[in-house]
Image: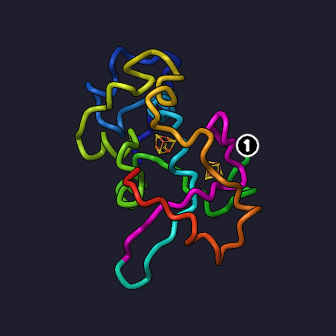
Amino acid sequence: MAKRPARTELRPRFWERFPLDRLSEREWEALCDGCGKCCLNKLEDEDTGEVVFTRVACRLLDDETCRCGNYHCRKAIVPECVVLTPQTIADVAYWMPATCAYRLLWQQQPLPDWHPLVTGDPESVHAAGMSVRGWTVPEFEIPVEDWEDHIIQEEL
Ligand code: SF4
Ligand code: SF4
């Protein structure tokens, strides 16, 4: 596996100039727009493989910041949490939200104009209405058998 460069600075418009596996760890993390959509629980149809998102959020998701409440220890608390890397993106892209920066770049599409890297403002994802801020329900309040009642019909 290629080792990623350990730069501390973000190179100018790095997301347009370098492939995903040539980004530093800091650049890779900076790609996340902070939307929180991937932290919504999903339901997968066993027959068709279709994946749908629900409003039921992972127990560690902060509905206000849309960030993980314990990012560094999350795998110990939520073992099923997927760790995105340049090596795993191909396997998980099919269920990632359509607006996810990792999915977009993996599909060789540009970042949207509301992405914080483009605007320079971490709040722009929320201002554009592209995050889950304020509309999730915590998973400890909803039994798994009721998640179907919270399926999101629109594409995320
Ligand atoms: S969907 Fe993608 S961009 Fe949004 S929070 Fe998850 S990893 Fe970050
Ligand atoms: S553990 Fe954190 S990063 Fe993983 S799904 Fe839950 S809130 Fe998201």
User: x, y percentage for residue 49?
Assistant: 38, 76
Q: Secondary structure at mark 1?
A: loop
Residue 88: image quadrant is bottom left
Q: Which of 151 and 116 lies nearest the eye of the viewer?
A: 151
Label 1 belongs to which residue? 70
- The answer to whether 111 is drawn above or below residue 74 in the figure is above
Q: Which of 32 and 148 lies nearest the eye of the viewer?
A: 148
For the residue marked with disc 1, what is the amino acid? Asn
Q: Which residues are magenta?
A: 49-68
Q: Residue at x 26, y 25 (%)?
A: 17
Q: Is residue 28 visible?
A: no
Q: Is residue 60 magenta?
A: yes
The answer to whether the residue bearing label 1 lies less than 8 angstroms from the nearest atom of ligand 2 is yes
Q: Residue at x 44, y 38 (%)?
A: 3
- The answer to whether 148 is drawn above or below residue 84 in the figure is below
Q: Which of 76 and 99 lies nearest the eye of the viewer?
A: 99
Q: Is residue 147 magenta?
A: no
Q: Residue at x 38, y 26 (%)?
A: 114
- The answer to whether 28 is drawn above or below residue 50 in the figure is above
- The answer to whether 82 is drawn above or below residue 12 in the figure is below
Q: Which of 35 and 102 lies nearest the eye of the viewer?
A: 35
User: x, y percentage for residue 131?
Assistant: 51, 38
Q: Residue at x 63, y 38 (%)?
A: 67
User: x, y percentage for residue 39?
Assistant: 57, 51
Q: Is residue 63 visible?
A: yes
